[in-house]
Image: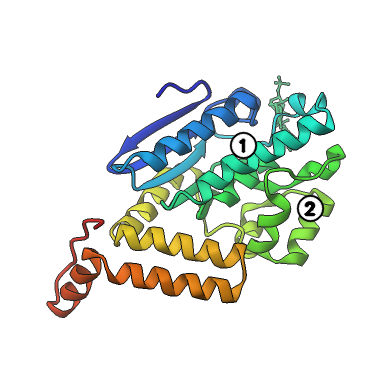
Amino acid sequence: MPYDLLRLEVSEGVATVTINRPDKLNALNNVLMGDLDRAFEEVEAAAEIRGLILTGAGEKAFVAGADIRELASLTPAEAERMALRGQGVFRRLETMGKPSIAAVNGFALGGGLELAMACALRVASENAKFGQPEIKLGIIPGYGGSQRLPRLVGRGRALEMLLTGAQIDAAEAHRIGLVNHVVPQQELGGFCRGLMSRILENAPLAAGLILNAVDAGLSGGLEEGLRFEAACFALSAATEDKAEGTAAFVEKRKPVFRGR
Ligand code: COA
């Protein structure tokens, strides 16, 4: 499928989506949001794609936010439509049932941080910078920042970032749990591919169920989450991969999972 402002490459079951607007620090304009929507749909639908790595073109930015030139002329009604659409695109990524890693190779500001937070995991290069600077523009985050940031790093730390609009560096992002790992920039791609292959060695249906169960608990509450977990556990017990995984343990060999 052709895309205007991103590249989608598939290798060994892993899709890499590279946001490709480096002259504008990969800022998310209307065209890019359409591209991302279609790319996530493609990744979700393709059985041969088992995981997604998302990154930005160039050495400076993952995504430096929503396109401020487009924001400037929005009416309130257009702003609401834009937020709902973007939230829907990021929610598709979050709920597609396949593991995703944001390879944050530079600035992840505003919508860029919101996009990274919709991924299952985040790995930063040492030069990465994170922030929700919307308040400095007189607006608030519209692609989920006020919701996912406190869920990831806690209310106090999230509110400090949201209310000051200040940037934090990769080491601080790691310290507060916003990113899973920090690596030198030239090692970022290889590290993310390695992390993804460790995930993909495991049973794919179980991976999807884990993603769904965590999401159900975080979007609902503990009781609902526990109920959903039990249903997912039952479903995992019905898979061929469960028979293979448990048999391989008993027979002291490596399991061969088939995603069935
Ligand atoms: N929207 C639109 N264009 C953006 C952008 C954004 N969010 N972020 C960067 N760009 C553009 C710049 O306008 C510039 O374009 P130009 O060369 O046509 O003038 C280009 O990307 C390079 O950015 P520049 O500001 O020159 O780079 P810098 O290294 O001096 O600064 C940042 C980097 C990230 C600190 C700065 O670009 C910035 O503050 N961006 C906006 C961040 C933001 O507020 N995001 C949240 C939006 S809701």
Who is closer to the viewer here, 15 or 77? 77
Q: Can residue 191 be seen in this view?
A: yes
Which residue matches tag 2? Answer: 162
Say which quadrant the C terminus sits in.
Answer: bottom left
Badge 2: how crowded within 10 Å, few (<14), some, or many (20+)?
A: many
Q: Earlier in the sequence, mark 1 or mark 2?
A: 1
Say which quadrant the N terminus sits in.
Answer: top left
Residue 44 location in percent, x, y?
Answer: 41, 42
Which image quadrant is residue 26 in? top right
Element under disc 2:
helix
Question: Which amino acid is tagged 1?
Answer: Val
Relative to 7, is 63 on the left or the right? Answer: right
The quarter of the rendering in which ligand 1 is drawn is top right
**Looking at this rendering, what residue extends furthest in the right direction?**
138
Which residue matches tag 1? Answer: 63
- Residue 35, labelled with which disc? none
Who is closer to the viewer here, 148 or 212? 212
Residue 144 location in percent, x, y?
Answer: 68, 49
Residue at x 68% of width, y 44% of height? 143
Element under disc 1:
strand
Residue at x 74% of width, y 47% of height? 132
**Looking at this rendering, what residue extends furthest in the left direction?**
251
Relative to 52, is 63 on the left or the right? Answer: right
Which image quadrant is residue 48 in? top left
- Please give the count of numbered marks on the rendered protein: 2
Residue 105 location in percent, x, y?
Answer: 54, 42
